[in-house]
Amino acid sequence: MAGTAFEELCMLCETLAKTPSRNAKIELAARFLSKLNSPSEVSDAVRLIIGEASKDFTLNLGYSHLLKALTNITGVGEKGFLAEFGETGDLGETVRRLLEKGRRGVQQALVFRRPTIGEVAGVLREIAEISGKGAMAKKLRILESYLKRLTPLEAKYFTKNLVGEIRHGFGEGLMEEALASAFQASPEAVRNAHMVVGSLGRVGEILKEQGAGSLQSFTVKPLTPIRPMLAEPAQTLREALEEHHGRTLLEYKLDGARVQIHKHHSQIKIFSRRLTEVTKSLPEIVELAETFRGEDFVVDGEVVAVDQSGRVMPFQEVMKRYRRIIGVEEALSRIPTRIFLFDIVYLNGEPLLKKPLTERRQLLEKVAPYEFLTPQVEASNLEEAEAFFEEALKAGCEGVMAKRPSSPYSPGRRGKHWLKIKRQPEVLDLVIVAAQYGYGYRYRWLSDYYLAALNGGGGGGRPETLPDYIEALHGWRFRVVGKTFKGLTNAEIEALTERLKGLALETVGRTVIVRPEIVVEVGFSNIQPSPQYSCGYALRFARILRIRDDKKPEEADSLDRVKQLASKKLEG
DNA sequence: ATTGGCTGCCC
DNA sequence: ATTCTGC
DNA sequence: GCAGAATGGGCAGCCAAT
């Protein structure tokens, strides 16, 4: 049977974008999916509708390559591209409009047979598979030839899939519902299968091929990663205790990287939070896992970097190990790691997802020696909880996790079974020295702000980066220590945009450098050494807490204060 | 052989 | 990762 | 309360340019 046209999928996406009601979106998508011809077509369609394709295989092709290809096809340069982009804030829509204005090489899209869903997915797969010398040129050639033969509408959604931003308000969660509706399965069964197999496209394929009944057999099995269970943020320990009815299990929340360790017979694999394999980067963890008891198991934990004396090192240090595949041996001795396990979801033939946490913890204690487990206490009052929290901070943690003792392991879910309580953010008053126009629904607003501290001297020299240039324009009176788009409501962003436009000094691309007059109170979790900002410091997880109209820029915090806070952290 | 731009993935 | 917003 | 959107700093890897 002939495949369904990709254009039909594009039209569905256009309708989804215009439909606000979630239920209506689900019905539209379900109707579309149930019409499709084959399991592989369902798989491809699901991926292309929610943008899973670009995440499933790595394209190594993005914005700049797209710009290059577009320049070759339409003759429009970066300026023309930015001008068009500024009209909508959407890459896909920009491509559509530019192609409508005309392309070189008299490639009439209509001359070609319309590509099917399977063909478009195949091209993306093809692009992903190219590597080695000359790879970029080859990828670009394919991209260009494809952009030439697609209609503008098709090119829009091809582009959106390329860069992975679909932006029609229809993501994984709603696709799960749509698949359930299209194939008469329960949403829970679809969700469960998704969490275990990792890809919704694959779930759709199975549904089309084997029907809804087949989903029941899906559960954890060693060497196939499942999506890790997630935690919801909570403000206070009190809140966590209340949520868990006065009795909760507290664990260290370490600032490392999530790992899922699988053992099957003698084979060991380690997976990251997003299910990529990191086994080769962590040979010492593999060696360690070989000593654990249990023929087959799947355990969940956090890997952190430690120094020679075993003290937990900052997050940046693990990252030097985490996805490294070149020079692993050398890095191994330079940056030792340590594993902290906190859960087990499979042991010797038996999935443990439905067992209560307390029971899983007991099994985990039988599998791995105590020193490799995350410290855990049971707290039934605030004093106990606070004492443990303090202890966790002293040990170098970002805070604690609070887990409901009876909770099952719900892969990929973020719920109140697991709560994370982080230490209070640190605060600085900083000056907005520049702002950037946003993307998507924020494209008309200056929604992203460069934050700077007062300079006590230093700086100067030839500007090399945009932050340098901003600092130079202000006579190096301020030093940029971060950038944020978080914390303000849309109404506040809109109002701030108007104020900032009135303070504009110079525009560079989509960035507006402004007179340094607006002071904001900024919360953040950390100050880290920065290779990016020339002052050498950067804020982690910065967000605006409030606008300080009561403060003048010269009353903002200084770079010296930033330095002090950073070094205090190191001693602590 | 090194450097730099870019992407993808950690948080 | 964090934050806000519409359903 | 959930799902989705918008976007941060910094790391390694890959490839192209020098």
Image (spheres, coloured by chain):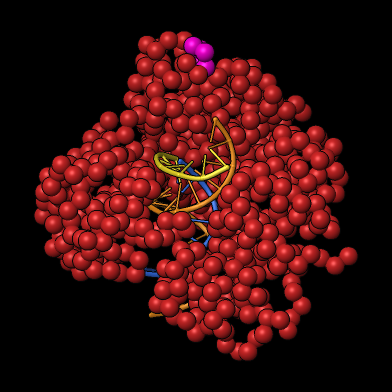
Chain colours: A red, B blue, C yellow, D orange
Front-most of residues A467 and A341: A467
Q: Position of residue A5 (x, y in %)?
A: 76, 67
Please tell me which residue is depicted at 24% across the width and 43% down the height of the picture.
A547
Q: Indicate yes or no whether the magenta region holds residue A246.
A: yes
A324 over A339 or under it: above or below: below
Front-most of residues A261 and A469: A469
Q: Quadrant of residue A147?
A: bottom right
Left/right of residue D11 with respect to residue A123 in the rendered view: left
Which quadrant would the N terminus of chain A be assigned to in this image? bottom right
Please tell me which residue is depicted at 81% across the width and 40% down the height of the picture.
A184
Q: Magenta segment range?
A: A244-248
Q: Position of residue A264 (x, y in %)?
A: 72, 36
Please tell me which residue is depicted at 61% across the width and 59% down the height of the picture.
A54
Please tell me which residue is depicted at 61% across the width and 46% down the height of the picture.
A21
Which quadrant would the C terminus of chain A be assigned to in this image? top left
Can I make out residue A166 in this image? yes
